[in-house]
Every structure is written in structure tokens, then in C-alpha cells.
Image (tube, helix red, strand yellow):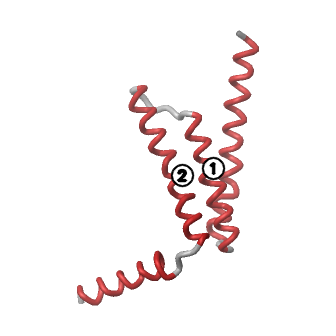
Amino acid sequence: MIYTLSRDVGGYLYDVFVTRFDFWLAFGMASQLIFTARFLVQWIASEKAGKSVMPVAFWFLSLAGGGMTLIYGLARRDAVIIMGQSLAVFIYLRNLMLIFRERGQAKDGA
């Protein structure tokens, strides 16, 4: 039973990562790596500050990774990814707009 299970899982992983490997799979994997990097950036910034902080780089990585994942979903015609990332990309962009608006107001007030 364990042998059969390991063979089936191995065959599945081979199919997903080797047999189906193409440009879009590489693009999707790069998208996920960029998206995941945002958590590392946030964690490092919080550790340095000694409290939970959300650096601007977090939002740029969110926008880049989310946008790339949305493009991947559109290319693969994956409704789940398209639905999940469509709104998220606008939220990331809006957060960046709010940050830069606040910085502009602080600069004008100074």
C-alpha cells in the first residue's frame, strides 16, 4: 500500500512539474516566488522594528506577484485564480496610492 501510494504521488508530481512544464508554468512559479517574498520582507522589517510593520516593499511585491498571478490565471483560463487576484490587485494598488498620498500630504505640511 505505501509503495503504491508513493508511486502514485511520484507520478502525479512528475506529471505536474515535468510533463506539463512550459513557459506559463515557469511564469506562474516565478509569480508565486515574488508573492511569497513579500512575507519575508514584512517579517524582516517587523523583526528590525520590534513590532509588526508593513513596509512599502510589501505592497509592491504584492502588486507584482498578484498581477503576475492574475496574468497566469488569464492565460490558463483558471476562474479560481482570476476571481482571487482580480480584486486583490486593485487593493494592493489602492494601498500604494494611499501611502503615496499620505507621504505627499506630510511633505506639503512640513
Name the residue rendered at 59%, 64% in the picture: 27
Say what secondary structure mark 2 lies in.
helix
Point out the residue furthest to the left here.
2
Observer-nearest residue: 44 or 87? 44
Circles 1, 2 touching at the beta carbon (< 8 Å): yes
In the figure, is residue 12 to the left or right of 100?
left
How many numbered marks are there? 2
Q: Is residue 44 above or below residue 12?
A: above
In the figure, is residue 43 to the left or right of 90?
left
Quadrant including the N terminus: bottom left
Name the residue rendered at 57%, 58% in the picture: 31
Residue 25 position in % (x across, y down): 56, 70
- Residue type at numbered disc 1: Ala
Quadrant including the C terminus: top right
Residue holding disc 1: 64
Residue 84 position in % (x across, y down): 63, 61
Mark sitting on residue 25: none
Instruction: Determine crowd level at label 1: few under 14, some 14-19, many 20+ residues with C-alpha closer than 10 A.
Output: many
Say what secondary structure mark 1 lies in.
helix
Residue holding disc 2: 34
The mark that comes first in sequence, 1 or 2, is 2
Point out the residue furthest to the top here.
110
Name the residue rendered at 70%, 29% in the picture: 100
Observer-nearest residue: 96 or 57? 57
Residue 23 position in % (x across, y down): 60, 70
Name the residue rendered at 42%, 28% in the picture: 51
Residue 74 position in % (x across, y down): 70, 68
